[in-house]
Image (tube, rainbow, N blue to C red):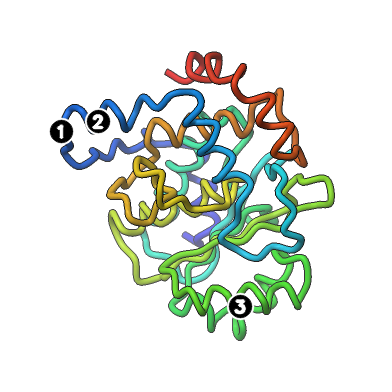
Amino acid sequence: MPVLAALAACARAPEPVPVVPAPAQPPAAWSAAFAPGDAAMTDAFLRLALGSEVTHGAQARRLLRFAAPVRIALAGEAAEETPRLLGWLAAQLAHVTGHDIAPAPAGARANLLVLSTPAVVADLRSRHAALAAPYFVSREAMARTLAAIEAGRPLCWFTIRPARDGAIENALVVVPSSLRGPALWRCLVEEVAQALGLPDDDAGWHYSVFNDGAPWLDLTRPDQLMLRMLYHPALRPGMTEAELRARLPALWPAVRQSLR
């Protein structure tokens, strides 16, 4: 079955979201990990949502998120398990955010493309250049992003193309085709979730997949709360840090209640 058709098939017959057990931690660490207060959550949200580890055009500190439904497609030389994992992940992210997120129908253009390829930078400069180009604001931005990625040498990466109002027009996630099993799952979880509008990593936020030094394989409880807040109807693309800081504290109690 072609990759895109297999991914669409996952949408028709979704499987349960996999439960990935977290590494054992002392009880005190678990309590601190999964029950951060509203002030800590606000500060972490602002770091993750308004920063950026990628080059995607103007670097204004404003909220980015999809306004349109998110449709995910898979291209390249993916592992056999990748369509199934992306089907699971799309279902999980749709539940967590409350946003319309699903695999793209076979043959349809997606606004979130997952590209699996052996050389995650060189292949975008050569055989996958035409496929990837629409996911950047310009050829110049694409060149700058690839140069930055090459310098940082991440295992997996993503980039976001926003409109002027802060709505994400499309996003690209690139993963090595050599990845399998838990390493592939962790890569997809982190990069696809970040591509929804949490574009920065935070080495100081220890209990999150958005910290490359943390051991988690799946979205933690704080990660899920961040994503639910990101797509809260009281927020809108393009909001500034001052607007968000004024709005977020009153929203956390309802966000926590809505995600159980």
- For the point 49% across and 13% down, the residue is 257
Q: Badge 1, how many Cα within 10 Å: few under 14, some, many 20+?
A: few
Query: Quick check: 196 left or right of 91?
Result: right
| Spatial separation of the CA atoms under disc 1 and disc 3 | 46 Å
Q: Which mark is residue 26?
A: 1
Please identify the quadrant where the C terminus is shown: top left
- For the point 60% across and 52% down, the residue is 51
In this orientation, which residue lies closer to the viewer: 26 or 5? 26
Q: Compare marks 3 and 2 and give the one earlier in the sequence.
A: 2
- The reply to whether the C-beta atoms of the residues labelled 2 and 1 are less than 8 Å apart is yes
Q: Compare marks 1 and 3 and give the one earlier in the sequence.
A: 1
In this orientation, which residue lies closer to the viewer: 169 or 253? 253
Q: Is residue 63 visible?
A: yes
- For the point 28% across and 57% down, the residue is 181
Establish if 162 lies above or below 238: below
Report x, y in % for residue 120: 49, 75
Amino acid type at image mark 3: His
Report x, y in % for residue 210: 44, 49
- For the point 40% across and 27% down, the residue is 36
- The reply to whether the C-beta atoms of the residues labelled 3 and 2 are less than 8 Å apart is no
| Spatial separation of the CA atoms under disc 2 and disc 1 | 6 Å
Secondary structure under the numbered disc 1 in the rendered image: loop
Establish if 172 lies above or below 238: below
Secondary structure under the numbered disc 3 in the rendered image: loop
Q: Which mark is residue 128?
A: 3
Q: Badge 3, how many Cα within 10 Å: few under 14, some, many 20+?
A: some
Q: Which mark is residue 167?
A: none
Query: Quick check: 194 left or right of 206?
Result: right
In this orientation, which residue lies closer to the viewer: 105 or 87? 87
Residue denoted by label 2: 30
- The reply to whether the C-beta atoms of the residues labelled 1 and 3 are less than 8 Å apart is no
**Quarter of the image holding residue 107?**
bottom right
